[in-house]
Amino acid sequence: MALYQISNGQIAIQIDSMGAELKSFKRMDTGTEYMWEGDPAYWKRTSPILFPIVGSLHNGSFLLDGKRYPMGQHGFARDMEFQLKSQDEREIWFRLVSDEETLAKYPYAFSLEVGYELQETSVVVKWKVSNPSDQELYFSIGGHPAFRCPVAKGENQEDYRIWFDTARQVSTGVIEEGLMTAEQAVCPLQDGYLQITEHLFDRDALVIERDQAHKVALVKPDGSHYLTVSFDAPLFGVWSPPGKKAPFICIEPWYGRCDAVDFDGTLQEREWGQKLAAKESFAASYQISV
């Protein structure tokens, strides 16, 4: 395990090789830290990579070719050591390659590369999944970055808001014990803004599907957008631990999600899952701006 840092003079980031996880994102002029610190009293992680699944599996396992494979929430990449692939002043890449350990619990050969590129006061988080084999590869991938909210000491999170780049109301899926129910809820937006309340996440993450928004910002009490996440992903989650008054909010672009409560299909049939043909690659990214 090693900690790497790159800076462009405006921002600096730190990444842990364990999970290729973003641990710190600071503005150089103000010294403001935007990433959650990973206090285990609330949540021990800061920005895990969700792979090869996003969310939880029905009955804690997936079915493939008639065999069941147990797997915990969000897969295994977040708990594995990545190797440094390349590094320069403004960009750094890490790589995780399938091995005997991964093949025993997920029988697909793969290469997962995670990159971080600095662009002025933004960091672009990049993923590349490659299929080196002669069979199709099924997977999901997602981000789970946690941002300080409130970002300034002495402020109250319930004076903050979340902004979505849509003039419409957004509908959200409802999760029960880690699985998606058939129920839908509506976020009470006012001009795109959602007020943060003590009970906003009582029913777990807000799961927003079907390309309803592609920019989400955290908003200070004075109305300024202090951090924005931009993405092309067709769905995303917004989350903070229920009932803990945790001082952070996660904005999570996803290419995949948890199983439905009544799902009884195969890995290939999981909703929002991704498929790669033999020798092909998948690339996606999202951007965090301050």
Image (spheres, rainbow, N blue to C red):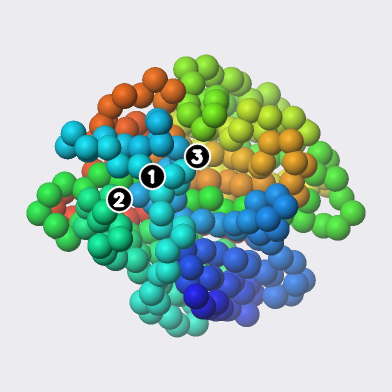
CA distance separating discs 2 and 1: 7 Å
Residue behind mark 2: 105
N-terminal of the pair, mark 2 or mark 3, is 2
Q: Secondary structure at mark 1?
A: loop
How crowded pointer 1 is (Cα within 10 Å; few <14, some 14-19, many 20+) is rated as some
Residue behind mark 1: 71
Q: Residue at x 70, y 58 (%)?
A: 39
Q: Is residue 55 left or right of residue 204?
A: left
Residue behind mark 3: 236
Q: Nearer the viewer, residue 151 or 216?
A: 151
N-terminal of the pair, mark 2 or mark 1, is 1
- Provide residue 285's location: percent of width, then percent of height: 42, 55
CA distance separating discs 1 and 3: 21 Å
Which dot, 2 or 3, sits closer to the camera? Answer: 2
**Rendered position, 203 above or below 277:** above
Q: Residue at x 59, y 71 (%)?
A: 13
**Rendered position, 61 above or below 190:** below
Residue flagged by tag 3: what amino acid is it?
A: Phe
Q: Quadrant of residue 162?
A: top right
Residue flagged by tag 2: what amino acid is it?
A: Lys
